[in-house]
Image (cartoon, rainbow, N blue to C red):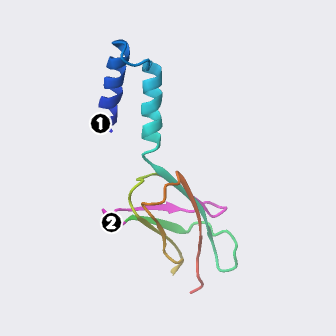
Amino acid sequence: MALRKMIVVAAICLASGGFFSLSAARAAEIEQRGSQNESRTLIGHVMNAQNAPQQKAIVYLKNTKTLAIKTYISEGDGSFRFSGIAPNIDYEVYAEHDGAHSDTKTISGFDNRKEVTMTLKIHSK
């Protein structure tokens, strides 16, 4: 992030010196787009064994590098959302409800989608 800002500042300095025709507004736009590209979003739904939306399921998002875990309690329609997911890290995702759980799915660090969508199905106990 700091490197990007230094590059943007350098671009603005060069633009004011006439070396490039890059305006300050354009440089700020490039920096903002760069910071948006630095994260991903995971959205999805939790379904029960009968394929109905499962509300109040706990969805776990585990960073496989740091082992940090984030949780989200699914909404009434079974939906969940995690934003600010690092782009080059693998994550494991699964859901639990009343002692039953879904299979664990992986989001690969090689997956370059900015928005990842998945459905987690809770198996019967």
User: Where residue 98 sits: x, y (%)?
Assistant: 54, 78
Position of 30 relative to 125 (above/below): above
Residue 58 visible? yes
Q: Residue furthest bottom?
A: 125
Please say if the residues under marks 1 and 2 sit with CB atoms less than 8 Å apart: no
Q: Mark 1 points at which residue?
A: 3
- Left or right of 50 on screen, residue 42: left
Q: Mark 2 points at which residue?
A: 67
Q: Residue 85 in magenta? A: no
Position of 91 relative to 37 (above/below): below
- Residue at position x 51%, y 67% in the image: 58
Callout 1 environment at 10 Å: few (<14), some (14 to 19), or many (20+)? few
Q: Residue 70 in magenta? A: yes
The type of residue carrying mark 2 is Leu
Q: Which residue lies furthest to the front in this view?
A: 19
- Residue at position x 57%, y 66% in the image: 56
Residue 81 visible? no
The quarter in which the N terminus is drawn is top left
The type of residue carrying mark 1 is Leu
- Write the start and end of the magenta stretch as one range: 64-83
Marked residue nearer the N-terminal end (1 or 2): 1
- Residue at position x 53%, y 54% in the image: 113
User: Where residue 24 sits: x, y (%)?
Assistant: 42, 19
User: Where residue 66 sits: x, y (%)?
Assistant: 30, 62
Q: Which of 6 and 119 is in front in this view?
A: 6
Q: Which of 66 and 29 is in front in this view?
A: 29
Image quarter for residue 31?
A: top left
- Left or right of 82 on screen, residue 89: left
